[in-house]
Amino acid sequence: MELGFIGLGRMGARMAGRLLAAGHDLIVHDVDPAAVRNLVDLGATAAKSAQDVGDRAGLVLTSLPTPGIVTDVVLGESGLVAGERVKHLVDLSTTGAPAARLIADALAERGITAVDAPVSGGTRGAEAGTLAVMVACADQDFALVEPVVSELGRVFHVGAEPGLGQVMKLVNNYLSAVALATTSEAMVVGVKAGLDPRTMIEVLNAGSGRNSATQDKFPRAVLPGTFDFGFASGLMEKDLGLFAEEAAGLHVPLWVGSAVHQMWRQAKDQLGPASDFTSIVRLVEGWAGA
Ligand code: NAD
């Protein structure tokens, strides 16, 4: 079956590249012509719209920034849903459960199955095919999409209900955000007191304070001062907002979560939505006068 891929950004370009390398024919679309050109150079075929992708591919993957954009690309004017050939959508974006359910319901009316399959592991995981892929769909749909998404990493079938993949992904990103925010505060205290940041990270990783920020984000993007982890502050703020909505709907209070969400709102405002999410430590340094 011919595959389609819409959204060729930091994650999408790398995931589409892996599907091409695995020998799949790929019809691609992005609003950014340069992003499309890069994939065409690797062997993909360009489509002129989301609908055009749906006219030419039976299974279409999407990796787009926000729930609003995914909904528009799939259900809007010249959207994927109007395509003649598309039978399956696999959405790799982080959209939250309500958008995944809305899309699944709308597509079901047209005989198209929707699978939410958000991913974790960053641009490095997308490049290497080592992402965690969190799939929610019925068993018969899982059998169909698993061989495709297994090219992207380790696949987990987390439930049958649309949106459960999204909930799993938001839980993951909540923990990633909390770890990075609290590690930033802890590091600024230590450095201001006179400790060496590299020594601190070494000690934390040998001790009980280790977490995804001490093991990966600080050594890779904060200590070298590159702030190029590859995930935007605006997207992290979106994910924390979606997680807060999910928790509120379930009546689960988020004492820590509301503070951490507020920190990324500030990052988005002060450093810009495109700033790398690891630059949150710069905000903490600013507040500390460090
Ligand atoms: P990105 O901003 O780098 O890429 C998004 C791409 O979508 C861009 O190429 C953009 O031009 C394209 N796009 C936007 N609107 C479009 C439209 N209407 N039609 C077609 N293309 C359109 O974002 P990203 O970092 O690749 O993230 C994509 C998704 O994956 C997001 O939902 C994000 O939360 C999630 N995610 C990101 C990471 C990461 O580390 N970057 C990790 C896991 C999950």
Image (cartoon, grey):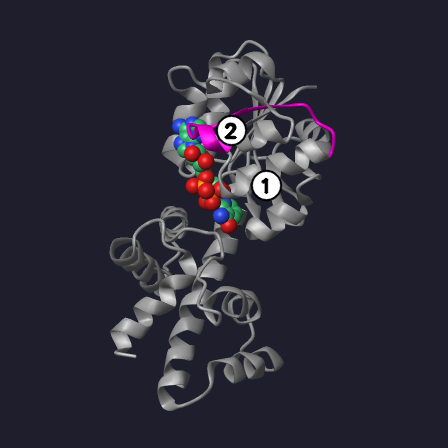
Quadrant including the N terminus: top right
Q: CA distance from mark 2 to mark 1?
A: 12 Å
Density class for disc 2 (Cα within 10 Å; few <14, some 14-19, many ≥20) is: many
Give yes or no for residue 52 being in the magenta stretch.
Answer: no
Residue 225 location, x and y as percent? 44, 68
- Magenta stretch: give its range: 22-35
Specify whether residue 115 is in view.
Answer: no
Q: Residue at x 51, y 14 (%)?
A: 52
The disc at residue 73 is: none
- Residue situated furthest bottom in the rendering: 194
Using residue 289 as the reference point, say whether residue 36 is left or right of it. Answer: right
Q: Which residue is mark 2?
A: 36
Using residue 117 as the reference point, say whether residue 179 is left or right of it. Answer: left
Q: Residue at x 63, y 36 (%)?
A: 17
At mark 2, the secondary structure is helix
Q: Which residue is mark 1?
A: 14
Q: Nearer the viewer, residue 285 or 182?
A: 285
